[in-house]
Image (tube, rainbow, N blue to C red):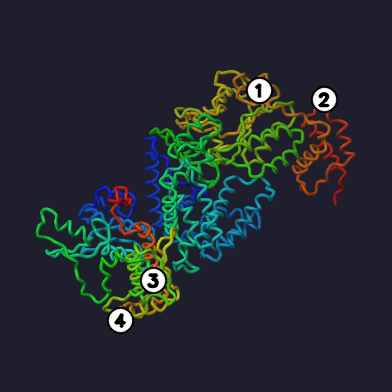
C-alpha cells in the first residue's frame, strides 16, 4: 500500500494499529499493510467498524492472501463480545474478492500461469500481464469448483446491472433468507456489498454442516443519510440460535457448560450488528455510479483517474 | 462530582502552541492524551468525564451498567450528607444507592426525576447557612445531565434530542479542530441515530454505544459536506461561531486567534481552553495556567497547593434569577435601588467569548455615611449571587501581604484573592475592601493600595504574577466592591480604577422595611424562629420614627439597630413565660 495511505490509517486508528512499531519477533504489523492500495477503502471501513465495536482490538497483521484481504487481530474481549468484529472481518474478506486490489474498481479472482491468485479488474490484469520483467506471467479468471457459496455472477454481468436487474439477482441468490415481503431498494453499484452482507448476516452454515434455519432479512434499502441498511427480522433469531446451540451441544459435548440459547441470541445480535455496521460504513465510501472503492488520493478521497 | 466531569485530556503539561495554523502542537498533544484516556476508559481503568462522553468516548469498560454503578457509588459517597438535610434528598440518594448496588435501566427515569426534583428544590429551599455552594449545584446539574445521557443510550428520544443540543453547544472556537469535529459528528449522530439504526436488532435491555452514534453522525456529516460543497462544514462552524466573532466573515481557521486578540484587549476575562469543566455548559476560566517549578520543599509545596487546578478551567458563577436577587436586596436595602439596578445591569450584559452570561461588574466603590449599610449590602449581594464574598478590612492595613509573598521566604504564600479562589473554587468571587480609605499610606512594608493597582486593571489582572507560585494568575474574573466614607484617603490612581457610586442614606420612608428586617435579624440571633416574629406594630414604628433619623439628619443603620434592639428588649420583657 502507498506509504501516504498507510500513514493515514495509522493516524486515524492509532490504537488499532499500535503494534506497527513493534519488532518482527513480536508482531507482523511491522510489515505494514501487505496489499495494494485498491483495498484502502475496505480496510478503512473495517478499521472504523472494529474501533466502533471494540476499541481494545489490536491488529496483528493485514495482508493479501489467496486473493483476499486477511485481517488478523487480537482482543481482550470474550468470544461473544467480538462476534461483531468477526462478522465485519468476514464481510471485508468477501468484499475484497470483488474489488481490484490495485485500482479498487470492480474485479474478480484471477490466477496467473505461475499459480499466483489475485483479485484484479480485467484492465489491471492486462496491465500486469504486460508489465515489464514478467513477460511470461498472465492472469486469467479463476474458476470455482465449490457448490456453495454459489459462484458470484461474472464481472461482465455485474457491471451491466440495472437497478431492477441487481435487485432480481440478489433476490434469486438469497431467496432462502429473504422474507416474503422483503423490500429491496438500492443502487446497482451496491450489489456486491449487499450480496456479501446478506451472505454473512444470514449465517449460512458451512457446507460440511447440516442445513438449519437462516436469519431472515426484511429490507435492504439505501438512503442518503443512513447508507445501505439491512433490516433483520428479530423473530428469526431464536430458531437460528436454538439450532446453533444444539450444534454446539453435539460438537462440544465435553464442555461442562455449553452456551445457552439466550447467550447464542446475544451472540447473533452482536454478529449481525457488526456486519450491518460495516455495510453502512463501506456503502458511504463507494462510488454510486460504478461501485468502485478506489482509487484514492493521499488523503483517502476518491479520485477520477 | 467534580472529579468525574473534569476534562482530563487537557493536562497541565501542554506545551505552548507553536503554530498559528488550525491545528497547534497543544491540540495535537491534547488529542493524543484524549486517545490514551479513551483507551484506559475502554479497559475499565477509569470513568469517562461528561465531556468525554459527549465527544464519543465509550462507557467505562464498554459497559453502561458498570459505568452507572461506579458513578452512583461515587455520588452516593459524596452527597450522603445531604440525606440528613431534607427527605427529598434522602429519597434521591436512596435511588443512587440502589443503582450502585444493582444498576437497572428501568430505574433510570425514577432516578432522573428524583435528581430533577432536588435541583428544583434548591431554588426554593431556605438554607440555614446561606445559599448552596456553586460546586454542589454544578455537581448535581452534571449528575442530571449524565443520567439524561444514560437515558439517551437507552433510546429515550427526548433525551437523545437534548443530548444532541447540549453536544452542539459545546462546539467552540477555543476547542481543538479534532474536538469540534467529534462534537459535531456526535451531535448529528444523536439526531439521526433513531432512524438510522431502525434495522438493528436492539432490545429494550440493550443500550446504544457512542461509537455507533458517532458513525451515524459521520455519515450525515459526509452527506452534508457533499451537499454543501467543500466549505459546507466550515459554514456550519461559522454559523455556530457567529456569536463569538465580531466579523461574521472571518474564517473559522482564524477564529481562535481572532478571539484571543479580541479578549486580550477587552474587559471580559479570557475564557478557558476547556470551557466545560465543572460547569459543563457554563462559562469558565483558567485561573492558574501554570506553576513555576523549583526543586526544593517550598517549590513542591507550592505545586501541591494548586496541582489540581493548574491548566484546569474553574467555573464562573452565573446568576440564574436576577429578579429574585433584586427583590431580596430591595427588601433589605430599599434605599439602594439605584445601586442594585446599576450593578445588576452590568451583570446582565456581561458575556464570555461564547455568548454565555456570568457575573462580573467593574470595580466599584460605595461611598456613604457611616452606618449606612454599605458593607451589609455588599455581603448580601455576594451571598445572594453565590459569589462567596470575602470581606477584607482595609482599616489600618500596614503592609502588602494582600499580594503574594515570595516563595523564597519561609512563610511564603499566594495572594489573598488567589487563595480565596482556590478555597471556593469559583473564578469570580466577590472581594469586599471594607473601609478602603482608612488604609495606611506608609510604604515601609509595602502598601495595600499599590498592590491593588495591578489587580484592578483588567489587562494586568489577567496575568498577575504570583511570587509564591512563580507564575501568572488570572484574577480578571474577580468582582471588586469597596466601601468608603470619604474619598479623601483614596489615592488618585486607585480612584481612576474604581467606579464611584454614592450609597444613598435611608430616609424616613424606608423605616418600616428596614426596621422589620433588622428586627428579624435580631430576634433570629436571639434564638427565635423567623416564622414567629411579629412585624413591628404601628405604635412601635411611631416610637422609632420619633428618634430616627436623628434630628441632625444622620440616618445610620447602626443607630436604627440599637433602637430596634430596644424594641426587641421591650417585647422580651412583656412576654409572659408559660
- Whole-Å distance between the Cαs marked 2 and 3? 89 Å
Residue A178 vs B185, above or below: the answer is below
Q: Secondary structure at mark 1?
A: helix
* Chain letter, disc 1 residue: B
Measured Cα–Cα span from mark 4 to mark 1: 97 Å
| Residue beneath disc 3 | A268
**Disc number at residue A210?**
4
> Closest to the observer: A300 or B231?
B231
Of the residues under marks 3 and 4, which one precedes in the sequence?
A: 4
Taking the spot 81% from the left edge, 37% from the top edge, the residue there is B515
Label 2: which residue?
B553
Q: Nearer the viewer, residue A140 or B509?
A: A140
How many numbered marks, from 0 up?
4
User: Chain under label 2?
Assistant: B
Q: Secondary structure at mark 3?
A: helix
Q: Is residue A302 left or right of residue B336?
A: left
Where does label 1 land, which residue?
A: B437
Gap between marks 2 and 4, in whole Å?
Answer: 108 Å
Q: Are marks 3 and 1 on the same chain?
A: no
Q: From the viewer's perspective, is the residue at label 2 or at label 4 nearer?
A: 4
Q: Are marks 4 and 1 on the same chain?
A: no
Residue B555 sits in which quadrant?
A: top right
Q: Are marks 2 and 3 on the same chain?
A: no
For label 2, count other residues whose C-alpha is less than 10 Å away and answer few (under 14), some (14-19) or many (20+).
few
> How far apart are the two marked residues, 3 and 4, measured between alpha carbons?
19 Å
Q: Is residue B330 above or below residue B367?
A: below
In this view, the mark in front (4 or 1): 4
Q: CA distance from mark 2 to mark 1?
A: 23 Å
The chain ID associated with circle 3 is A
Q: Sort mark 3 into few (<14), some (14-19) or many (20+) by Cα contacts within 10 Å.
A: many
Amino acid at each position: 500500500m502507498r506509504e501516504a495511505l498507510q500513514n493515514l490509517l495509522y493516524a486515524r486508528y492509532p490504537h488499532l494499529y499500535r503494534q506497527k512499531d513493534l519488532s518482527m519477533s513480536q508482531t507482523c504489523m511491522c510489515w505494514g499493510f501487505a496489499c495494494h492500495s485498491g483495498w484502502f477503502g475496505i480496510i478503512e471501513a473495517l478499521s472504523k467498524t472494529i474501533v466502533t465495536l471494540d476499541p481494545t482490538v489490536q491488529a496483528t497483521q493485514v495482508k493479501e492472501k489467496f486473493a483476499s484481504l486477511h485481517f488478523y487481530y487480537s482482543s481482550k474481549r470474550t468470544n461473544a463480545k467480538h462476534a461483531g468484529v468477526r462478522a465485519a472481518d468476514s464481510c471485508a474478506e468477501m468484499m475484497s474478492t470483488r474489488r481490484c486490489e490495485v485500482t479498487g474498481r470492480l474485479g474478480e479472482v484471477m490466477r496467473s500461469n505461475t499459480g499466483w491468485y489475485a483479485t484484479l479488474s480485467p484492465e489491471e490484469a492486462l496491465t500486469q500481464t504486460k508489465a515489464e520483467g514478467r513477460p511470461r506471467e498472465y492472469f486469467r479468471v479463476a474458476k470455482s469448483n465449490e457448490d456453495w457459496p454459489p459462484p458470484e455472477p461474472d464481472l461482465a454481468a455485474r457491471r451491466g446491472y440495472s437497478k431492477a436487474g441487481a435487485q432480481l439477482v440478489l433476490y434469486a441468490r438469497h431467496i432462502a433468507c429473504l422474507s416474503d415481503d422483503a423490500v429491496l431498494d438500492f443502487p446497482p453499484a451496491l450489489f456486491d456489498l449487499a450480496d456479501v452482507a446478506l451472505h454473512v448476516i444470514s449465517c449460512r452454515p458451512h457446507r460440511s454442516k447440516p442445513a438449519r434455519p437462516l436469519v431472515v432479512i426484511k429490507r435492504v434499502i439505501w438512503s442518503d443519510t443512513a447508507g445501505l441498511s439491512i433490516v433483520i427480522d428479530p423473530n428469526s433469531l431464536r430458531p437460528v440460535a436454538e439450532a446453533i446451540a444444539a450444534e454446539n451441544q453435539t460438537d462440544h459435548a465435553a464442555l461442562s457448560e455449553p452456551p445457552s440459547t439466550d447467550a447464542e441470541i446475544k451472540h447473533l445480535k452482536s454478529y449481525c450488528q457488526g456486519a450491518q455496521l460495516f455495510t453502512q460504513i463501506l456503502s458511504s465510501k463507494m462510488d454510486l455510479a460504478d461501485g468502485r472503492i478506489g482509487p484514492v488520493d493521499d488523503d483517502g478521497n476518491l479520485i477520477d483517474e | 462530582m467534580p472529579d468525574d466531569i473534569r476534562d482530563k485530556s487537557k493536562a497541565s503539561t501542554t506545551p505552548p502552541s507553536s503554530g498559528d495554523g488550525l491545528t497547534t502542537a497543544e491540540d495535537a498533544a491534547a488529542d493524543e492524551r484524549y486517545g490514551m484516556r479513551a483507551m484506559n476508559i475502554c479497559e475499565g481503568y477509569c470513568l469517562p468525564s461528561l465531556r468525554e462522553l459527549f465527544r464519543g468516548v465509550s462507557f467505562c469498560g464498554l459497559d453502561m451498567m458498570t459505568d452507572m454503578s461506579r458513578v452512583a457509588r461515587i455520588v452516593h459517597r459524596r452527597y450522603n450528607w445531604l440525606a440528613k438535610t431534607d427527605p427529598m434528598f434522602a429519597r434521591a440518594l436512596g435511588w443512587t444507592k440502589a443503582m450502585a448496588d444493582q444498576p437497572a435501566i428501568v430505574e433510570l427515569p425514577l432516578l432522573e426525576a428524583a435528581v430533577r426534583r432536588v435541583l428544583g428544590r434548591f431554588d426554593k429551599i431556605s438554607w440555614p447557612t446561606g445559599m448552596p455552594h456553586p460546586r454542589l449545584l454544578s455537581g448535581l446539574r452534571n449528575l442530571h445531565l449524565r443520567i439524561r445521557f444514560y437515558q439517551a443510550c437507552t433510546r429515550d428520544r427526548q433525551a437523545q434530542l437534548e443530548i444532541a443540543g447540549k453536544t452542539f453547544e459545546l462546539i467552540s472556537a477555543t476547542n481543538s479542530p479534532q474536538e469540534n469535529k467529534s462534537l459535531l459528528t456526535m451531535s448529528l449522530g444523536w439526531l439521526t441515530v433513531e432512524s438510522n439504526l431502525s434495522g438493528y436488532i436492539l432490545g429494550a435491555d440493550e443500550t446504544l454505544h457512542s461509537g455507533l452514534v458517532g458513525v451515524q453522525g459521520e455519515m450525515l456529516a459526509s452527506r452534508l459536506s457533499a451537499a454543501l460543497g467543500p466549505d459546507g462544514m466550515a459554514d456550519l462552524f461559522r454559523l455556530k461561531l457567529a456569536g463569538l466573532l465580531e466579523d461574521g466573515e472571518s474564517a473559522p481557521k482564524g477564529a481562535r486567534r481572532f478571539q484571543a486578540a479580541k479578549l486580550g484587549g477587552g474587559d471580559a476575562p479570557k475564557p478557558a481552553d476547556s470551557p466545560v469543566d465543572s460547569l459543563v455548559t457554563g462559562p469558565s476560566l483558567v485561573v492558574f495556567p501554570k506553576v513555576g517549578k523549583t526543586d526544593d520543599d517550598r517549590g513542591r509545596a507550592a505545586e501541591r497547593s494548586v496541582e489540581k487546578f493548574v491548566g484546569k478551567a474553574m467555573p464562573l458563577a452565573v446568576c440564574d434569577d436576577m429578579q429574585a436577587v433584586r427583590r431580596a436586596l430591595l427588601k433589605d436595602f430599599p434605599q439602594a435601588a439605584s445601586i442594585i439596578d446599576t450593578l445588576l445591569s452590568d451583570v446582565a450584559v456581561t458575556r464570555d467569548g461564547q455568548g454565555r452570561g456570568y457575573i462580573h461588574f467593574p470595580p466599584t466603590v460605595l461611598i456613604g455615611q457611616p452606618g449606612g449599610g454599605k458593607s451589609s449590602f455588599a455581603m448580601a449581594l455576594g451571598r445572594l449571587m453565590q459569589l462567596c464574598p470575602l470581606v477584607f478590612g482595609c482599616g489600618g492595613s500596614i503592609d502588602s501581604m494582600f499580594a503574594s509573598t515570595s516563595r523564597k521566604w519561609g512563610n511564603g504564600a499566594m495572594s489573598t484573592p488567589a487563595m480565596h479562589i482556590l478555597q471556593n473554587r469559583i473564578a469570580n468571587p466577590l472581594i469586599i475592601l471594607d473601609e478602603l480609605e482608612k488604609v495606611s499610606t506608609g510604604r515601609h512594608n509595602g502598601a495595600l493600595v499599590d498592590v491593588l493597582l495591578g489587580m484592578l486593571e483588567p489587562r494586568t489582572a489577567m496575568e498577575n504574577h504570583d511570587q509564591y507560585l512563580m507564575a501568572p494568575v488570572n484574577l480578571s474574573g474577580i468582582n471588586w466592591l469597596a466601601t468608603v466614607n470619604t474619598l479623601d484617603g483614596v489615592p488618585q490612581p486607585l480612584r481612576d480604577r474604581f467606579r464611584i457610586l454614592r450609597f444613598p442614606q435611608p430616609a424616613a420612608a424606608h423605616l418600616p422595611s428596614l426596621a422589620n428586617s433588622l428586627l428579624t435579624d435580631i430576634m433570629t440571633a436571639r434564638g427565635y424562629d423567623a416564622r414567629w416574629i411579629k412585624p413591628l406594630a404601628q405604635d412601635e414604628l411611631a416610637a422609632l420614627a420619633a428618634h430616627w433619623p436623628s434630628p441632625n439628619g444622620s440616618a445610620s443603620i447602626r443607630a436604627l439597630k440599637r433602637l430596634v434592639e430596644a424594641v426587641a428588649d421591650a417585647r422580651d420583657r412583656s412576654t409572659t413565660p408559660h
